[in-house]
Image (cartoon, rainbow, N blue to C red):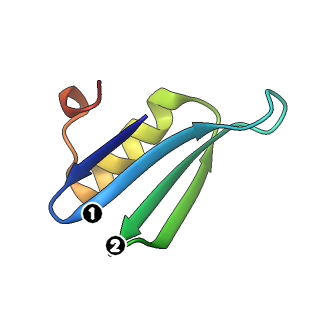
Amino acid sequence: MKISFNGLDFVIEEDYPEVGVYLYVYQNGKCIRDYLQNSIEACKEIALENFDVPIEKWV
């Protein structure tokens, strides 16, 4: 799952079930942040809280 918003690219990738889900934040092709969460929904919330990415923007 990937979107672009405010000049940044956001990628949500599931890792092995026992690990969780990562939210990666890229700027100019370089990863500037990554967050490990328990669910895709939690990653979307982090993107909203930290970067103002609207939940409905995710497809």
Q: Quick check: 44 above or below 27?
A: above
Q: Who's the residue at 45% across and 47% down the image?
A: 11
Quarter holding the C terminus is: top left
Q: Residues within 10 Å of mark 2 (few under 14, many from 20)?
A: few
Which kind of residue does numbered mark 1 sit on? Leu
Q: How far apart are marks 2 and 1 (CA)?
A: 5 Å
The residue sitting at the right extreme is: 18
Residue 45 placement (x, y as % from top left): 37, 39
The residue sitting at the left extreme is: 6
- The residue under label 1 is 8
Nearest the viewer among 8 and 19 is: 8
Quarter holding the N terminus is: top left
In the image, taking residue 36 as reference, residue 57 lies left or right, namely: left
Q: Who's the residue at 71% across and 36% down the image?
A: 20
Residue 40 placement (x, y as % from top left): 51, 30
Nearest the viewer among 16 and 29 is: 29
The residue sitting at the front extreme is: 29
- The residue under label 2 is 27
Q: Who's the residue at 26% across and 58% down the image?
A: 51
User: Which element type, helix, strand or loop, lies under badge 2?
Assistant: strand
Q: Quick check: 55 above or below 23?
A: above
In the image, taking residue 13 as reference, residue 42 lies left or right, namely: left
Q: Which of marks 2 and 1 is nearer the N terminus?
A: 1
Which kind of residue does numbered mark 2 sit on? Gln
Q: Who's the residue at 37% across and 51% down the image?
A: 10
Instruction: Tell me, yes or no, whether the two marked residues, 2 and 1, touch with CB atoms within 8 Å.
Output: yes
User: Which element type, helix, strand or loop, lies under badge 1?
Assistant: strand
Q: How crowded is mark 1: few (under 14 residues within 10 Å), some or many (20 or more)?
A: some
Residue 47 placement (x, y as % from top left): 35, 49
